[in-house]
Image: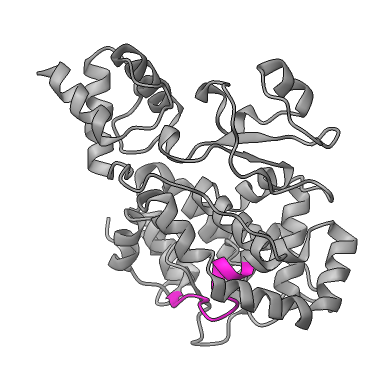
Amino acid sequence: MSFDQWIFEHFPKLIGHVQLLPEVLEKDNQQSEFTLPPWDYIDRLATPERMILGQKYLVEFDTELNCIFDRFGVSPSLLLAIWGIEANFGKALGTFPIGSALATLAFSGRARRRPYFTAQLQYYCSEIYPLQGVGKPICGSWAGASGHMQFMPETYAKFGVPYRSSGPANIWASIPDALMSAANYLAAEGLKEGDCLIKKPSLETDIGYSWDGIHYAADATVWAERGLKIEDAKDAEKYFCVSPVGRHGPRILLGGQVLALYQYNRSINYVLAVSKLATMIDGGHVDWSWDRTARPLGRSELTELQSILTELGYNAGASDGIMGPDTVRAVMQAQTGLGIEADGYPDLVLLAHLKTLKN
């Protein structure tokens, strides 16, 4: 079935209004959150220039940001950091017609994601398409997000709220509407006033790397049982550890706000970049030390690693180049067997060892 036939069958109202965009498919396979080393990704986004602009807008939108904080408990610096990273404070809203981008991904994107983008296209048809002017498609990212805070259509439908007016939220032209909508989203995802972003930027602990990850988020009492005492912990706030490059870099203790931020973009690199920029806008400083020689494996290398792990008797899950929990567990088991510290980070050293064992 051709793209036009698929549109005719499933989204007839979009006939003549969307087209297949090959560049979108190329970008879908090269997402920077997952292909760049964390130091490059974070340094590219959490910049001194964005800190200065964020501090400027902290003053310019003081009234609006404080009103939003009073209503939702979301800090001004966090909202500005998201705005700065998502759209460079309105300078980079995106150039892809989002209807065409979503249709492209729904029709011929990665198979496991097509249902998601089909659902987003349905929300686009019902919520955003009617707001467009004739011949003036709303543009955004290659993945179909748009507006100052880069909302997907479903997110806009559920959480878009205007700052003052009674009509639909205009997250494309009204900065207060966009900030208010983002705060509404974060609050709905559980962000609580007083929770922190970065609890400890570099954690010294003997607790095993097997406790890393958002799935092990817990309050300080649980962490104490695991062997980690969290100083000055807030009652009921949940914390979790991340080690983006395992033993080659910092172990970071994150707080409750990141649990909500992670729903905004499910990339640890992303939440670290936003958290760092928010800290900078508030006048703070975060300096992470990385072993920059320990680059992440490329997608084809990771696919090869997964295949070899499975051949050697470790269940690495699908050989798809995606670092899921099965792969982390298999990597840690292989590292233990090889006498390497079991941090779950798949590097070139591990790949070389496993190739030798296979041969």
Residue 313: x percent and y percent? Answer: 27, 12
247 versus 114 height, above or below: above
Question: Of 200 and 195, which appears nearest the observer?
Answer: 200
- The picture places residue 94, in percent across and down from the top left corner, at 48, 75
In the image, taking residue 27 as reference, residue 119 lies left or right, namely right
Residue 114 percent location from the top left of the image: 42, 49
Q: Between 132 and 94, which is closer to the camera in this rendering? A: 94
- In the image, is 218 to the left or to the right of 24? right
Count of numbered tags: 0
Q: Residue at x 41, y 24 (%)?
A: 326
18 and 343: which one is in front? 343
Instruction: Determine if residue 15 is in view.
Output: yes
Q: Is residue 323 above or below residue 12?
A: above
- For the record, the magenta segment spans 83-96
Work out which quarter of the rendered image holds the N terminus and state it: bottom left
Q: Is residue 33 visible?
A: no
Quarter of the picture containing the C terminus is top left
Question: Which residue sits at x=58%, y=66%?
Answer: 150
Q: Residue at x 43, y 32 (%)?
A: 247
Q: What residue is at 47 percent from the left and 61 percent from the top?
A: 43
